[in-house]
Amino acid sequence: MAPLRILGGLLAVAGLVLMCAPTLVSDPGPAADTFAAIERRIPYGGLAGLGALLVARTTLRPWVVSFASFVFWVTAGLLVARCVGLVLDGAQDQRQWMWVGVEAAIALAAGVYLRRSRPR
């Protein structure tokens, strides 16, 4: 297994753990509202997505596919973190649902592009 994939796996696991328990790194106190509580989890979703990208893709060429992979994996990580936050912190904030829709649309578009750009 390539060292880059091992690093990616470690980053993905760390991101998943921290998105479930963001106070392991720092505890800024109670959140002002549900939106702020969920937003504390989002950077760790990006970390998990970046780790998943390193596991899934270890080459940079072709550049367009690498960029689409980056967009897909990081956005998917953000989406997973937001969904974890909705489950753990509460789902009553409509702004979070708007972001779920935006992130799902971006991830879907990047995924469709990646699917069509695969060699047959």
Image (cartoon, rainbow, N blue to C red):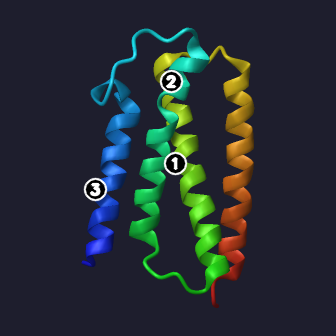
Q: Which residue is mark 1?
A: 77
Label 2 vs 3, first from the N-terminus? 3
Looking at the image, residue 107 lies above or below residue 4 = above
Q: Which residue is mark 2?
A: 87
Quadrant for the N terminus, please.
bottom left
Identified at 37% across, 31% down, the residue is 20
Q: Say whether marks 2 and 3 touch (CB < 8 Å).
A: no
Label 1 vs 2, first from the N-terminus? 1
x then y, percent, for residue 54 = 41, 67
Disc 3 crowd, CA 10 A, few/some/many (<14, 14-19, 20+): some
What kind of element bears circle 1?
helix
Q: Which residue is mark 3?
A: 10
Amino acid type at mark 1: Gly
Disc sitting over residue 93 in the figure: none
Looking at the image, residue 15 lies above or below residue 54 = above
x then y, percent, for residue 112 = 71, 67
Quadrant for the C terminus, please.
bottom right
x then y, percent, for residue 70 = 57, 64
Amino acid type at mark 3: Leu
Distance in Å between CA atoms under marks 2 and 3: 24 Å
Looking at the image, residue 79 lies above or below residue 61 = above
Q: Say whether marks 1 and 2 touch (CB < 8 Å).
A: no
Label 1 vs 3, first from the N-terminus? 3
